[in-house]
Amino acid sequence: MSEPLREEVASGRSEANYVVPGLERGLRILTEFSPREPVLGAPELSKRLDIPRTTVFRLLQTLELLGFIERVDKERNYKLGIAVLRLGFEYLSSLELTDLGLPVIESLRDSTGFTTHIVVRDGREVVFVAKAQSHTPGFGSIWVNVGTRLPAHASTHGHVLMGDLSLKELRALYPAGQLERLTKAAPETVDTLFDVVRGHALRGYALGNSAFEQGISVVTAPVRDHTQRVVACITVTVPRPEIDSTLIESGLIDKVQSAAAELSRRLNYRLDSGHTFLKALGLR
């Protein structure tokens, strides 16, 4: 055996040592379900995968407990469960948001000269999921990259992303009532946070002048999908202590709002006559 081939085989064996048999078998079970065969039972799965029937039963019970499969009758036949669908839909949704949104924030970057991002909320944190870096020299020092997380209650992005949450929903998100004072501008209570969130929602955008990091300011606007809910925000990051009147007069806010509206349109958002987000705020 040649040396390169010997190294390749050794590498394959090394990687195989990390395989978890139970996980592998569970995933193999899930891949057996298809549109042609949406319902399968333990005996058939045992035969196809060459796994002992008792092992298959245990794997099926585990997958059922986690919601990845559902029992369809007393004969212990199964079909794919809601957890599989949820994983698929959430993945497709994230792909849709970033794939459809990247050209939008690149265009916004080109028209403003500033670095732009798409940001989403994950519970009490915001996550940067897409970035269009400014071509202007010196702007590369902005440290926020894809994957960066910030506390939602203390960031302008978080305030916008919580824009359609009611006071009851905010209290459920922060049951303690008191909020960690991470910056001087951060709200200290849920009630104060709600007032800030509501103000931004009514304006349709938010300005953050050195709100989270000194010398870094942002303009942020909400993005909605076909459910009428806020699913993301588009933001322009300005490496200055504040958004001055010159930038505002240049149309910076309008450009950010237009970009957010364009991505909302691409996500099939249509404003309904009931103004769902205003209802959520208790304003209609």
Image (spheres, grey):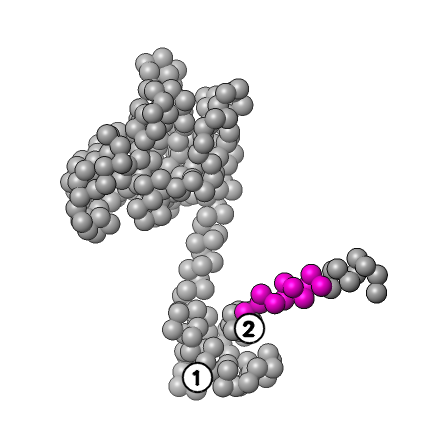
> Is 165 left, or right, of 62 in this rendering?
left
Residue sitting at 48 percent across and 46 percent down? 96
Regarding residue 224, the answer to whether it shows in the image is no
Residue sitting at 74 percent across and 60 percent down? 8
Question: Badge 2: how crowded within 10 Å, few (<14), some, or many (20+)?
Answer: few
Question: Badge 1: how crowded within 10 Å, few (<14), some, or many (20+)?
Answer: some
- In magenta segment, residue 14: yes
Q: Which disc, if any, is residue 76?
A: 1
Where residue 275 appears, as percent x and y from the top left, is: 25, 40
Secondary structure under tag 1 reads loop
Q: Which disc, if any, is residue 13?
A: none
Where residue 249 appears, as percent x and y from the top left, is: 35, 14
Disc 1 from disc 2: Cα separation? 23 Å
> Is 11 left, or right, of 26 in this rendering?
right
Where residue 58 appears, as percent x and y from the top left, is: 45, 80
Image quadrant where residue 190 sits: top left
Q: Which disc, if any, is residue 21?
A: 2
